Image: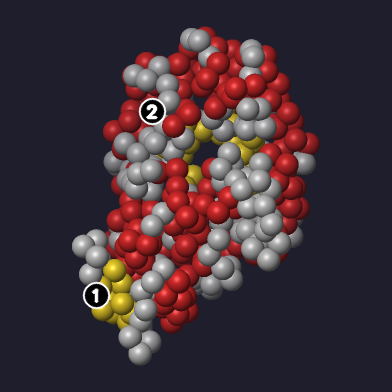
Amino acid sequence: MTSLLLPRQDGSLETYRLQGTPIARPTSVPTFNRIAYAAAHVVSDPLRDSDPWGRPAIDWEATMAFRHHLWSLGFRIAEAMDTAQRGMGLAWADAQELIRRSLAEAKSVAGADLACGAGTDHLSPDAARSIEDVIAAYEEQIGFVEGEGGRAIMMASRALARIARSTDDYRRVYGHILRQAKDKVVLHWLGDMFDPQLRGYWGSENFEEALETVLSIISENSAKVEGIKISLLDNAKEVALRNGLPEGVLCFTGDDFNYAELIEGDGQKYSHALLGIFDAVAPSASKALAALADGDLTTFRSVIEPTVPLSRKIFEAPTQYYKAGVVFLAWLNGHQRHFTLPAGLQSARGLLHYADIFRLADRANVLDKPELAVARMRNFLAVLGVEQAD
């Protein structure tokens, strides 16, 4: 059956009939003219999860299978990032195992590529006593990534945001780490809508002042910076950063509200992508990016633009709980056998939110297996008290 009862915002129920058409898989791995990283989630294992808030169990087989799914669609993978619940359920010890496994798995796939999140999340912000503590924490994590043969994405640091007293503290930390990095690093500007503990990052809550600081850090270390991911959910701010970057340093959009126009560009400059939403809409994003590489803007826009309302719903405030919507779609589309997240984060969103995701995913042609999605949605609704008509 391709219809079911869904709740409305006013508490009533409506009969919703599916209207979308699944996106066909490419016959071979597509090529893009934008660098496209999909930030990938991890799959929990509820059959072994005796302490989901403390040390969640991970289903490594399903987690690696999902990475193969993304590679087959042409994506690079941004591993062990906030989409994988770094700092929200995935501890550094598990992140190390995830990085180790993913790097090993990539070697078995021709053309597979990934970069790995390295931050300071094993250092509690309250435990940091000095800038040297932050530097040592970054050195440990980036050293691990490089020791495993990986490239690092230098994630924003809660500890640095707490302890820094001036922009000079940011210049000191980033300059020290970048100078000793083996390979070029992707920097990470994550707004406080994603993580409230990052408020005032780069030493100021004023965007123009923060922008000046980060651009000066990049300029002083441009030989070691591949690019910077910016996630402020404001396309004008991203364009300002993009226009100020030195030649050869890339801008990676992390704007899950405005990625379609930022990736397309303004005719002169464009953004590459490092996005959590690509986890959830991978077949659509892959088809759109392949069309863009062929110069087919009509197909690019017609495929990717319907995913934007879905992404805005998934990433609505409180934005840091977007992981729940990402995993919800992975479950509906058959990439995992259950709807649970590390730390029980599926409880961070309510039924009405998930019902809206279901509608928008259908309209965006993101439900890959409509009958499976309907069957699973019916079960989910029944658990939450919405019984379906016979």
In space, the residues marked 1 and 2 are separated at their CA atoms by 44 Å
Residue 94: image x %, image y %? Answer: 70, 46
Q: Is residue 68 above or below residue 165?
A: below
Based on the displayed image, in which of its 4 quarters is residue 8 positioned? bottom left
In terms of secondary structure, where does tag 2 sit? helix
In terms of secondary structure, where does tag 1 sit? strand
Q: Residue lying farthest front? A: 385
Counting residues from the start of the chain, the first of labels 1 and 2 encountered is: 1
Q: Is residue 225 above or below residue 290?
A: above
Is residue 230 visible to the viewer in this orientation of the structure? Answer: no
| Amino acid beneath label 1 | Glu
Residue 275: image x %, image y %? Answer: 47, 47
Quadrant including the C terminus: bottom left
Q: Is residue 121 above or below residue 116?
A: above
Q: Residue at x 33, y 31 (%)?
A: 237
Q: Residue at x 55, y 61 (%)?
A: 340
| Number of numbered markers | 2
Is 370 left, or right, of 334 in this rendering? left
The residue to which callout 2 is attached is 241
| Amino acid beneath label 2 | Leu
Quadrant including the N terminus: bottom left
The residue to which callout 1 is attached is 14
Within 10 angstroms of label 1, few (less than 14), some, or many (20 or more) residues?
few
Q: Which mark is residue 268?
A: none
